[in-house]
Image (cartoon, helix red, strand yellow):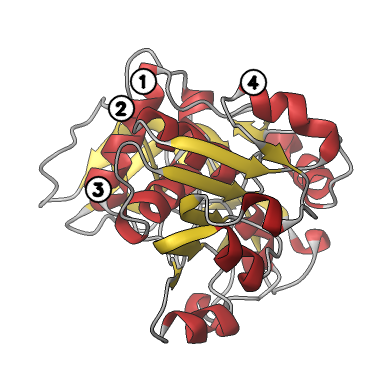
Amino acid sequence: MKGTSEVKRIQYHEYGGPEVMRLEDFEPAPLGAEEVLVRVRAAAANPMDFGIRAGRMKHVTGRRFPRAMGYDFAGVVEAVGDRVTRLRVGDEVLGGTSIKEAGAFADVVVAHEKGIVNKPGNLSFEDAAGIPTVGITALQALMTKGKLQPGQSVFVHSCLGGVGRSAVQLALAHQATVAGSCRATARSEARDLGIDPVVDFDFDPASLAGRFDLVVITAGALPVKAARTILKPGGRIVSILPTPSNLARSALPGPFHTLIARPVTKDLEEVARAAGRGTLRLPIARTVPLSQAIPALTEFERKATGKRGKLIITPGG
C-alpha cells in the first residue's frame, strides 16, 4: 500500500475544460481537529464536478491552484483528527468533501467528519461511492424542503437522472406515490422503478392538473407554470437548481422553493441506511482505475457514452 507521501490525485492548475485535468502527485493537507483521512476505494463523478472545474462556482471555490477534483467517495479511515468522535481508524465509510476542498479522485482524501458516515457492510465500495451527493440532495428536496408525508403524491421531473432516481426511490420508501418525466425511450425503465404515470418531458400539464402534493425539479427546465398546474392547492414545488431566477422566486410568497443541499450527517446516515436496505440503488455505467480516469471523465462529460449510470473511479491501474 502506498504511503501518504506517494499518492496521486486528479487536479487542475486553472479553470477550464477537460484538457486542464492532470493526474499528479500531491501531499495531503495536515488533518484538522474535525477532519478524517480516508484511503479511497471508490469515487464517483457528478455533473457538478465539471461545472466547478469550468469555474462556474469560483465565487465559492476561489482562485488558489492546484484544485483537486471529485466529491463523493467510499473507503477506509486511515487517520482522524483530535476531536473526531464518530469514526475510527479502520472504519469502512462513505461520504463527500466540501465544495471548496474536493479531492475524491485520488488515492487518499481529507474531509470533515460531518460529511462522512459508516458504510453498510453489505454495500460495495463502488455502490457506496455513488450515493452521497445525489442521495442527500434527493432526501433534502423531499423532506427538508418538500415536507413529504406518507401517502402523498410526488412528481419528479427528470426521474431517471441521479437525483431524480434517488428521489423516486426514497419517496416510494416513504410510502408516497410517484409520477415522473423522462425521455420517451426510457419509459419502461421508469415504470420498472415504480413510477406511474410516466410522461415525456414535453407533456401537457393539463393532463395532470392538480394531482401532486410535491413537484421536484431535478434537471432541465420544467416551466414554473406547468409545475403550478400539476400541483394540488397547498402543495410545494422544489427545484435543486439554484439559479438566480429560482433563488429570487423562492424569496417570494408561494409554493416555490430552491434547495441548496448541505452536508447534514443524519441525512447522509439515512441515505446510507436506505442503500444498505436496498431501497436506494444507482446504476453504474462504468468503473475505471485512477490511472485511466481522465479519458473516462472527458468522455462522461461530453456524454459520448450512451450508457446511463455512474462513472466510478477506483485506485491503481
Q: Camera-side residue: 137 or 83?
A: 137
Identify the disc placed on residue 273. 2
Of the residues tagged 1 and 4, which is closer to the observer?
A: 4
Sort mark 1 into few (<14), some (14-19) or many (20+) by Cα contacts within 10 Å: some
Q: Position of residue 106 (x, y in %)?
A: 55, 43
Q: Position of residue 155 (x, y in %)?
A: 55, 48
Pick whichever of labels 1 and 4 is earlier in the sequence.
4
> Could you tell me if the residues under marks 2 and 1 are in contact, i.e. CB atoms within 8 Å?
yes
The amino acid pointed to by label 2 is Arg
Q: Is residue 255 above or below residue 293?
A: below
* Element class at badge 2: helix
The amino acid pointed to by label 1 is Gly
For the view shown, which residue lies furthest in the top direction?
122
For the view shown, which residue lies furthest in the right direction?
304
Identify the disc placed on residue 192. 4
The amino acid pointed to by label 4 is Asp
- On the picture, is 173 further left or further right than 61? left
Identify the disc placed on residue 28. none
Quote the CA–CA distance across marks 2 and 3: 12 Å
- On the picture, is 222 further left or further right than 78? right
Residue at position x 37%, y 57% from top? Answer: 146
Quote the CA–CA distance across marks 4 and 3: 31 Å
Residue at position x 63%, y 50% from top? Answer: 208
Quote the CA–CA distance across marks 1 and 3: 16 Å
Residue that carries the numbered disc 1 in the rendered image: 276
Q: Is residue 105 above or below residue 316?
A: below
Sort mark 2 into few (<14), some (14-19) or many (20+) by Cα contacts within 10 Å: some
Pick whichever of labels 4 and 2 is earlier in the sequence.
4
Residue that carries the numbered disc 3 in the rendered image: 265
> Could you tell me if the residues under marks 2 and 3 are in contact, i.e. CB atoms within 8 Å?
no
